[in-house]
Image: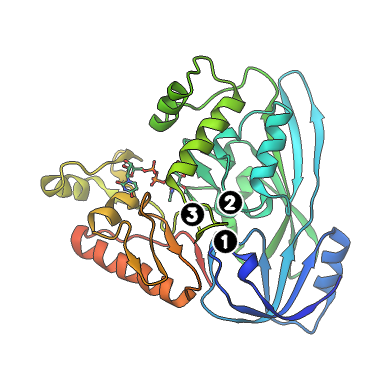
Amino acid sequence: MHIKQNISLKAYNTFGIDVNAKHFVSVSSFDELNQVLKLENYQKKLILGGGSNMLLTSNFDGLVIHINIKGINIISKDQQSVIVKANAGENWHNFVLWCLKHNFGGIENLSLIPGNVGTAPIQNIGAYGVELKDTFVSCEAISLETKTLKTFNKEDCNFGYRNSIFKNSAKGKYIITSVTFKLSTQNHKLNINYGAITSELENMGIKNPTIQDVSEAIITIRKSKLPDPKKIGNSGSFFKNPIIPKELYNELRKNFDDIPNYPVSKTQVKVPAGWLIEKAGFKGKHFGNYGVHKNQALVLVNYGNAKGKDILKLSKLIQKTVKRIFNISIEAEVNIL
Ligand code: EPU
């Protein structure tokens, strides 16, 4: 274990923002993590996983702890299901592929989501009708205060749409070290009703899809819509889809008759922020070396050497414009640091 000084975080955040960490350490084992947490001369700490859900707007003058603890273990298995525990530093998509190789079903719709296993529960990652919480059993996390390990079961996590206890009362207090899932081993329950999946499977000429086929279809859809962070810096959806009162939705329909919606409750609907941002005229717009992606307006992009502050400024302009046109407040999904 080696603590480095003045390290660029460019390679550690998918937005590719070049800011420095005053101190930086990458931990590959639980022992190393425990040793680092015992160090008393670092007041400020930033826990970094895959760096896929953050916008860095300035240098960090504390200690960045990069969680790189790997390992996937089968805890138990019966005829129908398997319990799998993955350590926090595993890349999420590699974990999905590992499950598909073993024919374990349940997370195939979450293929190609950037980030690591340990950060997935924080925002309850989701795509194409499936969320992490659907297969989540528990996670283990070290308390930064007491340095002891605590298990959070599903109820403890209080999962919601892109939300959990780790974004609320437990925010900044724990380091998730592993996540345990319950997956199917046969008679997999497929979620293929999301429009684009059905048509992609048809394109592939597949009538009775396997979980591997569903994953392949989703990978194709995501590649066609979302920029590859290795080529164009981005953090996936920058904003959450807003949930609005039905009255406001009905009011808006008078002027915008094609505004999409997903039912949430008797009184509320969810509206795609990508649609609002596109209607507000931002889709595909370049602002020098940053902008709004041409295929998905929810995604802000760094075309190279953009500053986090510039992207933040653009996000605020988008929020203000959407508010002015639709009277809807859209909230950032990424953490602004
Ligand atoms: N839309 C537009 N213009 C756009 C983008 C979207 O009009 O530029 C409209 C589409 O026509 C469609 C609707 O918005 O009617 C929904 O679009 P899409 O299926 O692409 O999904 P989304 O609601 O924009 C959410 C997630 C994505 C996830 C997809 C698929 C959020 C904040 N985002 O996007 O998650 O991949 O559904 O399930 O919920 C992420 O979190 O980083 C992410 C990419």
Q: Is mark 3 within 8 Å of ligand 1?
A: yes
N-terminal-most mark, 3 or 1 = 1
Whether residues under marks 3 and 1 lie with C-beta atoms below 8 angstroms apart, the answer is yes
Q: Say what secondary structure mark 3 lies in.
A: loop
Q: Residues within 10 Å of mark 3 (few under 14, many from 20)?
A: many
Residue for point 23% across, 59% down: 280
Q: Is mark 2 within 8 Å of ligand 1?
A: yes
Considering only vertical position in the picture, is 304 above or below 216? below
The residue where tag 2 is placed is: 114
Residue for point 49% across, 15% down: 207
Residue 258, given in percent of the width and then of the height, sits at 19, 41
The residue where tag 1 is placed is: 14
The residue where tag 3 is placed is: 236
Residue 194, given in percent of the width and then of the height, sits at 42, 31
Q: Residues within 10 Å of mark 1 (few under 14, many from 20)?
A: many
For the residue pair 38 and 112, the one nearer the viewer reads as 112
Q: Amino acid at mark 1?
A: Thr
Whether residues under marks 1 and 2 lie with C-beta atoms below 8 angstroms apart, the answer is yes
Considering only vertical position in the picture, is 58 above or below 71? below
Residue 267, given in percent of the width and then of the height, sits at 28, 43
Where on the picture, by quarter, is residue 72? top right
Give the side of residue 294 with respect to residue 71, left or right.
left
Residue 317, given in percent of the width and then of the height, sits at 31, 70
Distance CA(mark 1)–CA(mark 2): 8 Å
Q: Say what secondary structure mark 2 lies in.
A: loop
Q: Amino acid at mark 2?
A: Pro
